[in-house]
Image (tube, rainbow, N blue to C red):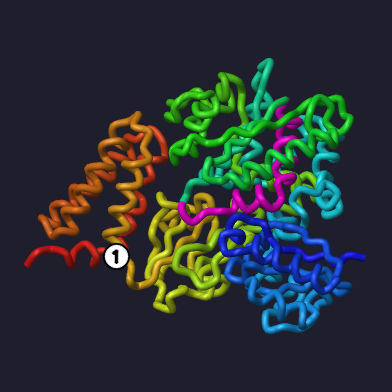
Amino acid sequence: MSIRIYVPKDAAVRSIGADYVALAIEAESAKRGISIDIVRNGTRGALWLEPMVEVETREGRVAYGPVTVSDVDSLFDASFHMGGQHKLSLGLTEDIPWLARQDRVTFARVGVIDPLSLADYQEHGGLVGLRRALTLEQEEIVTEVTQSGLRGRGGAGFPAGIKWRTVMATQSDQKFICCNADEGDSGTFADRMLMEGDPFTLLEGMTIAGLAVGASEGVVYIRSEYPAAYATLNQAIEFARAFGWLGDNVLGSGRAFDIRTRLGGGSYVCGEETAMLESIEGKRGVVRSKPPLPAIFGLFGKPTVINNVLTLATVPAILADGADAYMARGVGRSVGTQVFQLGGNIARGGIVETAFGVTLEELVNDYGSGTLSGLPVRAVQVGGPLGAYLPVSSLNVSMDYESLLAAGGMLGHGGVVVFDESVDMAQQAKFAMEFCAVESCGKCTPCRLGSTRGAETILKIMNGEDVQDNKKLLLDLCEVMTDGSLCAMGGLTPLPVRSAMLHFSEDFDRRARA
C-alpha cells in the first residue's frame, strides 16, 4: 500500500520551491523502492513553515517544514515517510499550536484535501449543504443565510441575506450569481488560497445562491494575476459538470445551474462591483452610477447577486450546520469567522481564521510573532491599500466591523499589513494617493484629479514647502474626495492619508524648513 505524502501546490508555496521538493521526494522514494502517493494539496496557511510536507500515518498527518530539496535525503534517512523524527519535525499537523488555536469554517478543508478530488471533498463534508438546500424552498434558503448573520467579506460588510432576498423578489427571465474574485488589495491572498486549495467550496456556495434566488448561471471574475487559481477553478468546474452537479440537472433535482469563469481586466477598480459587471460584459471597467442597484439591474441588465469569494465559500457550512452554529461565533453584529491575512513586515505571515473579536494585538504579536526585522511595530494597515494606518496604541482594538469603524478604520477584506519603526508614514500617505491616481477609472473628477493633486501636495510637504498650509490643503482635498467620489476608490483613499497625518504627524511636521 502506498504512503500518502502531501506537498502543497499553492502559488505562494510553489514560488519557494514546492514543485522541486515534490519531484525530489518522488525521485528519492523510487530510488529507495518506497511506494508513495504524492498529493498536491493547498497550503495550510502557515506560510513561514512552507514548504510544509505532511505524511499520513496511523496517528494522523505528521508535518515537516520548511523543507528544501537538500533536506529530502536526510528526511528519508530518518524514515519521515513513516512519521520518523527529524530536525524539521513539527509533530501532528492538527496539534501545531498556530493551527490548533484557529476556528476554521470557510477554510476547514484548505490544505487538508486534494483540491480536485470530489471524493476527498465529499469525505470531508462537501456537498452536504447543497444537498440540504435542494430539499428547501427558495425562501427557506434565504432565511437560513439571513439568520446566520453572514455579511459580505469583500469589504462593505453588507448582510448577504438581504442582498439575496432582493434578487429573489425581483421578477426576471434571467438572474445571475457573480463571484468577485478580483482580489487586488495589497496584503490579501485568502481568495486565491481558497480557489487553489478548495475550489469546490466556492462552486457549492454559488450553486446554493443560484437555487436560493432563482438564478441559472454563475460567473467567477478572477483577477488576471491568478493563473493557477484560474486553471484550478476551471478544472473543478469541469469535474462538477461531469459529476452531474453543474448543468441542466443539479444532482438530479431537475433544476439548472452552471458556472463559467472570466479573467479580470487587470485594473484594481474592477474589484468595485459595478466596474466588474462592465468588464464581464466586455466593456471598459468603469464604475456605474447607483441606483439602480446590481441586485435589480446587474449583469446584462438582469438581477444579480454579487458576493466575494469568502462570502460564497462560507454558505455551504451555514447550510450544512445551520444558522445558529454560525451565529454562535463572533461579537455583536459581526458574527461568524473572518479569514485574516497577515503580511508585510511580520515574522509569521499567513492565514488566520478565527471568530470576530480577536484583537489586532493577538493577530500581530501572538499569531504573527511581531516583525520579521525584529524592530518594534510602528504601524498596522488593516483593510488593504485604502485602509487606515493604526498606531501601536490601537492594537487592542477588536477585529470586527463596528469596533474598527469606531477606531477610525475598516475591516475590508481582512488584510493586516505590518510596518516596523523604520517606515516613513508621509511616504505611505503619498503612496495611497499615487495608487489611487494610477488605478482610478477616471469617471469622476474628485478621484481622478484629487488623487493626483493629493500626491503632489504630500510631495511638497515632504520637501518642506509651506508644511502647515499644505497639510490644511491636503485635509480639504481629502474631504472633497470622500464626499464627492462616485465609488469607494476615491472615497476611501483619504482614509490612509488622514490616519497617517493623525497618528504619525511627526513624519509630516519634521520636514518643515527652519
For image coordinates 71% across by 77% down, the residue present is 73
- Is 380 left, or right, of 232 in this rendering? left
| Whole-percent x, y for residue 379 in the image | 39, 66
Is residue 116 among the parts visible in the rendering? Answer: yes
Q: Is residue 88 above or below residue 513?
A: below
Asked if the magenta segment contains residue 211, the reply would be yes
Q: Which residue is mark 1?
A: 424
Quadrant location of residue 374?
bottom left
| Whole-percent x, y for residue 285 in the image | 45, 30
> Magenta region: which residues?
186-214
For image coordinates 73% across by 78% down, the residue present is 75
Asked if the magenta segment contains residue 54, the reply would be no
Quadrant location of residue 112?
bottom right
Quadrant location of residue 490?
top left
Q: Residue furthest front?
A: 31
Pick the residue in front: 137 or 487.
487
Q: Could you tell me the amino acid type at mark 1?
A: Asp
- Name the element at disc 1: loop
Q: Is residue 177 above or below residue 369?
A: above
Q: Residue furthest left?
A: 514
